[in-house]
Amino acid sequence: MSHEKYMLQALKEAQKAFKKDEVPVGAVLVDNTTGNIIARSHNKTEHGLDPTAHAEIDVIRKACKKLSTKRLWNTSLYVTLEPCAMCAAAISFARIENLVIGALDEKGGAVINGVKFFENKTCHHKPRIEIGVLAEESTKLLKTFFKNKR
């Protein structure tokens, strides 16, 4: 599987969020066997008036509903920004096999930064993690968004 191919799809989702004046984070969930995208989404917290409507949470909800399961074994999640603690917990509970991250988030991230959720002994499942895939593109989109907000 080409990480760049799927991260580009996550970036397309982030661009949708940007156009809707949402923090531009996008995510896609991929079946590791077929390479098919199971679900895709972007942040919807502002317009959905829902603090849990992060791209990762929405993708997990969509995929679980589509597949009629609460476990997403043999999948890879591509997300343009390092997940927060809430999203990291959901990734663990869903048993996602691989997590591919674009940009790191020193302030709100909880995988490489912050609480390092997957390193806690109370964590039930730790995905394989790859960081920095199309990080420049993800970072540029986020910086542009927040610059426009100032």
Image (tube, grey):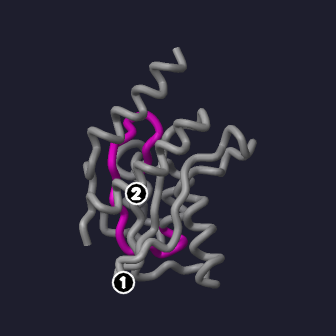
Q: Residue 49 in the image: state x and y as whole percent.
A: 75, 42
Say whether residue 97 is magenta: yes
Q: Residue 119 in the image: state x and y as whole percent.
A: 37, 59
Q: Residue type at mark 2? A: Gln
Per the rendered image, the range of residues in magenta is 92-110
Q: Residue type at mark 1? A: Thr
**Pointer 1 residue:** 34
Q: Quadrant of residue 149?
A: top right
Q: Quadrant of residue 103?
A: top left
Q: Is residue 138 left or right of residue 122?
A: left
Residue sitting nearer the eye, 146 or 118? 146
Q: Which mark is residue 74?
A: none
**Image point 60% across, 59% down: which residue?**
58
- Distance (Cα) linking label 1 and label 2: 16 Å
Number of numbered labels in the structure image: 2
**Image point 61% across, 69% down: which residue?**
62
